[in-house]
Amino acid sequence: MVFGVGLLVNAILIAIPVGGSVGALMGLDAHRAATGQKPLFTGDNDDGINPGNGNGNGKGGDSTGGGGGGHPTVTNNGVEHTLYCDLSWGITPPSKTEQYTLNPNQWGVTSDSTGNGLCMNITTLVNQTYAAKTAPEFSITWQYDPAPESMPVHGYPNIRVDDVLPKEMDKISELNLDLHWTYGVGDKTAASTDTKALEKENLATNVAIDMFLDTDADKAENGTEAKFEVMVWFWMSSLEAQPHGWGHPKTHRVVEGTNFTLFSDKNDNGQQVLSWVPDTIVERFTGDIYPLITELYNLEGDDYPAKDDYLGSLSFGTEVYSVNNNVTFWAEQYKIDIKSRG
């Protein structure tokens, strides 16, 4: 289950050459050392930021996406690459179109956590001029050792768009998604996901959209108070990152040629978690995923939302458990277009 705060983004990520992401910033260690900052991937990236509670609701200081505050930036031809290694930090790059927030969201990191840590690299345009429904490209490089079974997740780095939700679900007609992501071994972004290489590194993670729903609009915006958490997964790397209710499928639904299976159970917070998991890895997805939500209306009982409930938040990210060596998640393209009825 994704424990992170639900975040929504109306976005298509800016494509840049492969390897021009986190890997291009590894040389900033020298800069950090020269300015008295901690090295990257030290396993201690608190920087005084509150890691939040067990549901990933930690909130750090706001940022405009530029450097400062221990966040080194490299600028090249009007494009900025800024690195954030904080536990939690609300990053809202200035934009002349949609506003969005990104967060490393390492809510599960404690003083006992071991490993190299996690850094989020965000690519922004200096002129703030993005096409409609566009957000920065971002990538996550991380490595953590396995945590106790009672709290195995170290974080859910993700992205959201602001001031869009909540919205009554029966007033939504489509939730169109255009998505391309990859995972790779090492500090640089990968052109495609080599699942066998990642398996050798004992990678435990998943890639998913995370939504929170409730009959109350205010509660639907809160990842702790919402009654329902609805997820659409695109990959589960191993059984260590399985959803709640794994092994007890509820139903199936084919959307845009992908077969999704629904699993459901309560989390430790008492919320009902409904997870649609694909049969295989889905790096690219284009189409309307709203049928996966409306399908829930047809299932009986209090364990499923009603059509007049509110969709309060929607996020996209990767849930980080553990891995032997550094790996990099790259959100190369991401667009969400929520269409309303009428």
Image: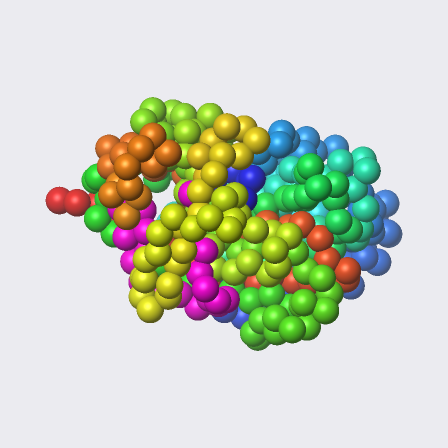
Q: Is residue 200 left or right of residue 35?
A: left
- The answer to whether residue 279 is magenta is yes
The spot of residue 249 in percent (x, y) is: 43, 51
Compared with 42, 6 (above or below) is above
How does the figure colour the protein chain or chains?
rainbow
The spot of residue 132 in percent (x, y) is: 34, 56
Compared with 333, 55 (above or below) is above
Most distant residue in the front direction:
248
Q: Residue at x 21, y 48 (%)?
A: 173
The spot of residue 242 in percent (x, y) is: 56, 51
Q: Quadrant of the N terminus?
A: top right
- The answer to whether residue 54 is magenta is no
Q: Is residue 195 left or right of residue 40?
A: left
Q: Is residue 198 visible?
A: yes
Hey, which quadrant is residue 206 in on the image?
bottom right
Q: Is residue 83 left or right of residue 132?
A: right
The spot of residue 341 in percent (x, y) is: 17, 45
Hey, which quadrant is residue 171 in on the image?
top left
Of residues 64 and 294, which is closer to you in this image? 294
Hey, which quadrant is residue 220 in on the image?
top left
Q: Quadrant of the C terminus?
A: top left
Q: Which residues are magenta?
A: 274-294
Q: Residue at x 71, y 41 (%)?
A: 149
Of residues 170 and 130, which is closer to you in this image? 170
Q: Residue at x 74, y 44 (%)?
A: 147
Q: Residue at x 75, y 49 (%)?
A: 146
Of residues 132 and 194, which is closer to you in this image? 194
